[in-house]
Amino acid sequence: MKQFISFVQKEFRHIFRDRRTMLILIGMPIVQIVLFGFAITTEVRNINVVLLDPAKDRVTRQITEKLAASDYFNIVGIIGNSHETERVLLDGTADMVVAFDERFDEKLYREGKAAVQLIVDATDPNTAITEINYAAQIIRETQMEMSGISPSGQIIPDMRMLYNPQMESAYNFVPGVMGLILMLICAMMTSISIVREKETGTMELLLVSPVKPPCIILSKAVPYLVISCANMITILLMAVFVLQVPFAGSVAWMAAISLLYILVCLSLGLLISTLVKTQVAAMLISGVLLMMPALLLSGMIYPVENMPKILESVSSIIPARWYIASVKKLMIQGLEISCVWKEFIILLFMAVFLLAVSIKKFKLRLQ
Amino acid sequence: MLLKFLLEKEIKQIRRNPFLPRLIIAYPVLVMLVFPWVANLEVKDINLCIVDNDHSVYSQRLTEQISASEYFCLSGTAATCDEAMESIKRNDSDVILEIDAGFEKDLVRGGNSTVMISPNSVNGTKGAFAASYLSQILSDFSDGIREELPSGGPPSGIIEINPQYRYNPCLDYKTFIIPALMVILLTVICGFLPTLNIVGEKEKGTIEQINVTPVKKSLFILSKLIPYWITGIFILTVCLGLAALIYGLIPAGSLLTVYLFAILFVVTYSGLGLVVSNYSTTMQQAMFVMFFFTIVMLLMSGIFTPVRSMPGWAQAITYANPLRYFVEAMRAIYLKGSGFFALITQFFVLLGIAGLFGIWAIMSYKKR
Amino acid sequence: MTNKAITVENITKRFGGFTAVDGISFGIERGEIFGFLGANGAGKTTVMRMLCGLSKPTSGSGMVAGFDMMTETESIKRSIGYMSQKFSLYADLTVRENLRLFGAIYGLRGRAIAVRTVKMLRELGFYAERNTMVKDLPLGWQQKLAFSTAIFHSPEIVFLDEPTGGVDPLTRRQFWELIYKAADSGITVFVTTHYMDEAEYCDRVSIMVDGRIEALDTPSNLKRQYNAASMDDVFQRLAQTAKRNDTI
């Protein structure tokens, strides 16, 4: 036991001595939370609109005013004819051109119909759809107000955004950041630090010492476990107090499933370290095979259910996917543990499997 | 002349590395094959649970109309709202539509009827999309009903809204993300690999041997960067080919402009790698610092989320982000067919950033 | 111009508040084998790095191969060879590729490199291994190869930083034969070592203690001066006076 403690101390010293890495380990989650919480949003805002308004009558002016008054649109210019549409979209002056019919007011009330073209830069299709929706809604509302008749025969939807009434994108990102950071620290750092001892030859030194090999490996894992827990607490505190993400569920179960996930990541790191010989290989493997999938296939940015079936099944072997899903349920939706038993069992199975394989591999290498 | 020998050394070392050549070939192919399918923010197949308190012909028709849409699939009906909430908790449904009793009666009488839409909004985007699609269908439905009713007829003074989607008329998310994937690939290859290479020589001590020789440091560094620049351009070529073959995606603008920007970008980003390598003593350190910057730059580039939606301070940060300009340029060339002169701002800003990184790299090298 | 290969006047190097090298002076003749001894942390490596142009002295002056240490470091680098205690050839290049690279670095032409490579590898008896990856050679061979690479371009001075660490006695012997041969051809050899028997092979020896040169003479004079049976005794006696710790 004494040996074990001194080994753990040695590992901590390695980590603390490298100030820059330490700073990044601590700073990365904070920066990511700030970016995700405040900078990065999937909402669409500041839509630059250019007007093509040959009519310049009561109705078009009213619509223009409404657009300008909304949070979403900035009117940045007016063009004289439709040939210029292409130019303003191409050079990025406008995200959308709103082109009214000639004699708009007259057509609307004499002929019963007037058209408005919403020409949008659809380079980003999602944004484009949202922009059209916003504009269409404002135009309809304006028309209704102007006609002065209370609408009839309408279905009025009453919206209730469950779990996230403010539609904060942070609610979706916080679990993702946790999944990513824990993977980064546990798997990547552990594998690199073990492989470095292999590379420098100090591993042999440790292995010939009377300390049992599992003890050595465990002592390498402990500091990263501690750092991960510290990071997790930082992320949670920042999420709750800075981003005002609610913590609706049980703290104990959150801690339990996070520990389980950390265990999975540590065993992954251990497994990688038994497979490769050089630090570069360890980094690239954990970077390419762990981080990229954790970022893209876990449902953090792109919803899993949108993927083709094959990739959806590939994503089911990614631990981060299950962890992120369970954090969403436990923390944000505040569901009871019975709703995440599936995720729990899958992670448990992964942990046992990975540990067993890496211990076997490690022993094999010793012989 | 000497550069030729140094390049020969670097290329041989890369080729003999058991891992790198495979990575350089396999990684872009994998990314181009897999990620366009993954990187998909289109919201489809939303699971809808309907609580029908009216049990009328109209509510039945509404249900059918919704199930017929490409966005929704009916995951079930529930008798009560609580039951529906259970299905949300189990993740069986994404959105609940509750139809009030008296739905049909209100409509027939020409009054307004209400329904309740409750999407699971943990993923805000998805929730908002579900809500907005659903209200669209509701409004179409009520228009249809009004026309049928004797009292109705088309109301006078309708504004017809005609959306036109330029540059991506099919609203295909893949054409949006593929040029960005090329940017990500070049970032990873030309940022990480030269940095790890230089720090690797530091760790092994072979760089000390070079330092006592008359080789100019700048020449030595250049010999380390050039192979990765070439690799980057090679990877870009592979990606351009794959994009055309698999996804039928061909740049609307000129290939020459694509390459021009790509060359400028790989030079810029490897400059950042150089700065990091100058400040790092171990590979682990270099890796983490690079990782940190790369993640921040990727997130702040507009690749995943629009830059113009960010708050002012965050937008200010993106002005210093080389990725932002490269992504803008790539997307503009690919989708809008912009020519070089339309992108001249991006070009010169990128050039400026490249110069800054270059100067910084040289300064930090001299200090040591 | 003097006939000295290296002259150093009152050179000091400080790192922050720590004085690693404290005003040392010495001169080395052309073609001399100069042994540079000292306990770990005495300042040997720092002196060596300054002489090679890797770092600049805080104060003092000196000439290496006829060039000023303070201002002409690039010219110095062109006239010296260097082999460090860490093995410093590229392990993932073959023997021939390493020679080709370092030959080119010192400005030899392609044909001259090829001719010299064959001649040198024949002399070393390595010709059969010319296409072997350096990492696959035994350590002793690697060291000999590194030395031959360091003098491949016929430098005026060659710096050897503990060149025989971890090598068996027989190979060490062969290694010193290479050193003598190089010195005979007019190359000045500046060598640091921890093996006191090797110190006996040198023309002259200096011993550094705590950043100063405490003794500098031929091995036989030093033994007489300190009334010692071997260089080992001389070294022990001087090293005991050190106040600085073993670590740096």
Image (cartoon, rainbow, N blue to C red):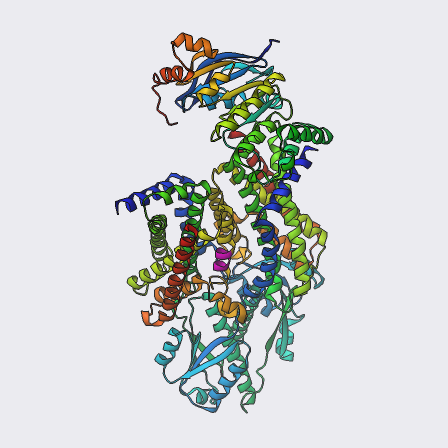
Specify the quadrant of the image occupied by residue A8.
Answer: top left
| Residue placed furthest toward the front | C170
Instruction: Name which residue lies at 63% across and 26% down.
Output: C152
Main secondary structure found in the magenta portion: helix
Residue C9 x/y as whole percent: 50, 12
What is the span of residues highlighted in magenta in the rendered image? A289-295
B41 within the magenta span: no
Q: Nearer the viewer, residue A160 or A256?
A: A256
Residue B267 visible (yes or no): yes
Specify the quadrant of the image occupied by residue C230.
Answer: top left
Q: Nearer the viewer, residue A156 or A354?
A: A354
| Residue placed furthest toward the left | A2
Q: Is residue B346 left or right of residue A46?
A: right
Q: Nearer the viewer, residue C230 or B316?
A: C230
Q: Is residue C157 above or below residue A133?
A: above
Specify the quadrant of the image occupied by residue B365.
Answer: top right
Residue C151 x/y as whole percent: 61, 25
